[in-house]
């Protein structure tokens, strides 16, 4: 069974693969330009003291996303 969650729900220290970016228009384009494509492995490194934003690592780059932006990316947390 595939365990699908939003990137914003990924706990610190966890790793997942991107399934889809569910953002229309310029925001979706920007997220894809930053490397969030299906199959990309994403690791949640850390979060700000109040939980937002979080820092993710993908493709050798650290990326800071707000909860509202990360909530538009679906990920698979299975293996």
Image: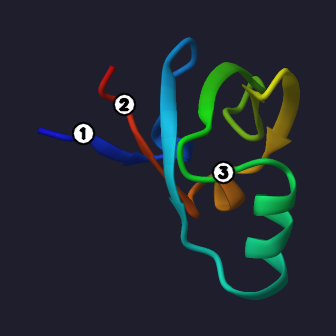
Give the residue at x 49% y 36%: 17
Q: Nearer the viewer, residue 11 or 38?
A: 38
Image position, residue 60 (x, y; %)? 84, 21
Disc assigned to residue 3: 1
Residue lying at the far left in this picture: please name it: 1
Task: Identify the residue shown where x is 61% and y is 38%.
Answer: 40
Q: How far apart in space, not on screen, are marks 1 and 2 (Cα)?
A: 6 Å
Label 1 secondary element: loop
- On screen, residue 14 versus residue 29, left or right, reads left
Under circle 3, the secondary element is: helix
The span from disc 3 to disc 2 (Cα, nearest Å) is 18 Å
Asked whether the beta carbons under mark 1 and mark 2 sit within 8 Å of each other, the answer is yes
Residue 75 vertical placement versus 31 (above, below)? above
Residue on which the image places disc 3? 67
View extreme (front): residue: 39
Q: Which residue lies under the disc numbered 2?
A: 77
* Quarter of the rendering occupied by the C terminus: top left
Number of the label disc, if any, that sits on residue 68: none
Q: How many marks?
A: 3
Q: Nearer the viewer, residue 7 or 37?
A: 37
């Amino acid at each position: 069974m595939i365990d699908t969650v939003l990137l914003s729900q990924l706990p610190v220290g966890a790793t997942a693969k991107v399934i889809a970016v569910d953002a229309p228009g310029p925001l979706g384009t920007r997220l894809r330009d930053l490397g969030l494509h299906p199959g990309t492995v994403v690791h949640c490194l850390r979060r700000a003291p109040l939980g937002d934003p979080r820092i993710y690592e993908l493709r050798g780059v650290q990326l800071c996303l707000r909860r509202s932006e990360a909530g538009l990316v679906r990920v698979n947390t299975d293996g």
